[in-house]
Image (spheres, rainbow, N blue to C red):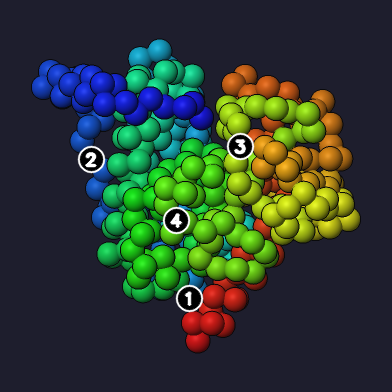
Amino acid sequence: MNKRNNSPIAIAILSLFMLISMLLGGCAQSVGVDYTKQENWAYRPVGDAVTQNCDVFFIAPTVYLGTDDSHSMDINSEETKAQFLGATNMEKGLYDSQTNFFAPYYRQAGLNAYTMDASESDQYFDLAYEDVSKAFDVYLKDYNQGRPFILAGFSQGSEMLLRLMEEKFGDKALSDQLVAAYLIGWRVTPEELSKYPFLKMAQNSGDTGVIVSFNSEAVGVQTSLIVPDKTIGINPLNWKTDSTPATASENLGAVFTDYAGGIVKEVPNLTGAYLDPIRGTLRVTDVTVADFPPVLSIFQDGVYHLYDYQFFYRNLQENVKERIGNYLSVAS
């Protein structure tokens, strides 16, 4: 969530630091993850468990808080993996009735890495991306079997998937398999779209091969760790990319889930929303900051980041069905 410093000097210093650490044996996390093993996947359907003609490759949000001397999740920790699985389950219901659901464990950067200077934190985000990229390559080679797929993530998961798309989806054959990329809770900037012209943002409810992204905020928020200045997005209630407001009556249902994926509470017509014409964020109009606090101290009041999926759950669920249907109808 910080603006990371990618200057040549910073990169050189970081590379030297990592090399010294490895030579001294102080970098146990540098050992790669073997994604041919089931134990390194939260979900990996194989054989008879593959029942759908579309997949989801899902990357979970940040669950590891980090400590003073640890800034990367240990995927050998059963306690942390349980939290990771729970966070995945909270979003899984949007996708899995229509798809084969794949979700790798990865050495995600701890939440504390987001408060560091980029020269310190880049190594932890690079490690996380190394795992995501490797898991995706194994998924394509061993498990996908040519099926169309959805990329889906939240927060750090969306950040990792955007980086994956920037690196790999200039390949037309690969991008042609993409139904949509639900990169929710992370910014997509005009500069990135200019640098990577093969990235296309969703323009309506049914286009395919596109990025679906939004970041929820109260009216009045002017900056955040997620969106320091500007992002490009779409309104998940009316599927407009301009500031046309959607009313609460268009909200099919906010759904609040637990770590097992069970529904704790469902509220039809909870809130309306509109896209801010300047920031590009999604202004949520009918809830209060007191009722939906940021929870994590790194977010200020009015940043509804933790509720991005929950506020618009049923609309997103229906949208996944629509985009898959549209893709398969054209493909057939």
Question: Toward the viewer: 91 or 259?
Answer: 91
- Label 2 SS: loop
Q: Secondary structure at mark 3?
A: loop
Name the amino acid type tagged 1. Answer: Asn
Q: Position of residue 246 (x, y in %)?
A: 83, 53
Residue type for callout 4:
Pro
Q: Residue furthest top?
A: 68
Q: Of the residues under marks 4 and 3, which one precedes in the sequence?
A: 4
Which of the labelled discs sits on residue 230, or is there none?
Answer: 3
Q: Are marks 4 and 2 in contact (CB under 8 Å)?
A: no
Which mark sits nearer the N-terminus, 4 or 2?
A: 2
**Amino acid type, callout 2:** Gly
Q: Nearer the viewer, mark 4 or mark 1?
A: 4
Please give the name of the residue rendered at 26% of the width and 43% of the height, measured from the top-left corner: 33
Per the model, the C-alpha gap separating discs 4 and 3 is 18 Å
Q: Is residue 260 visible?
A: no
Q: From mark 2 to mark 3, how far is it between C-alphas?
A: 35 Å
Residue named by callout 2: 32
Residue picked out by circle 1: 53
Residue at the disc numbered 4: 197
Q: Percent from the top left, x then y, of residue 67?
A: 42, 17
- SS of the residue at dot 4? loop
In the rendered view, does 158 fall on the left or right side of 69?
right
- Which class describes the residues within 10 Å of circle 4: few (<14), some (14-19), or many (20+)? few
Q: What amino acid does circle 3 point to?
A: Lys
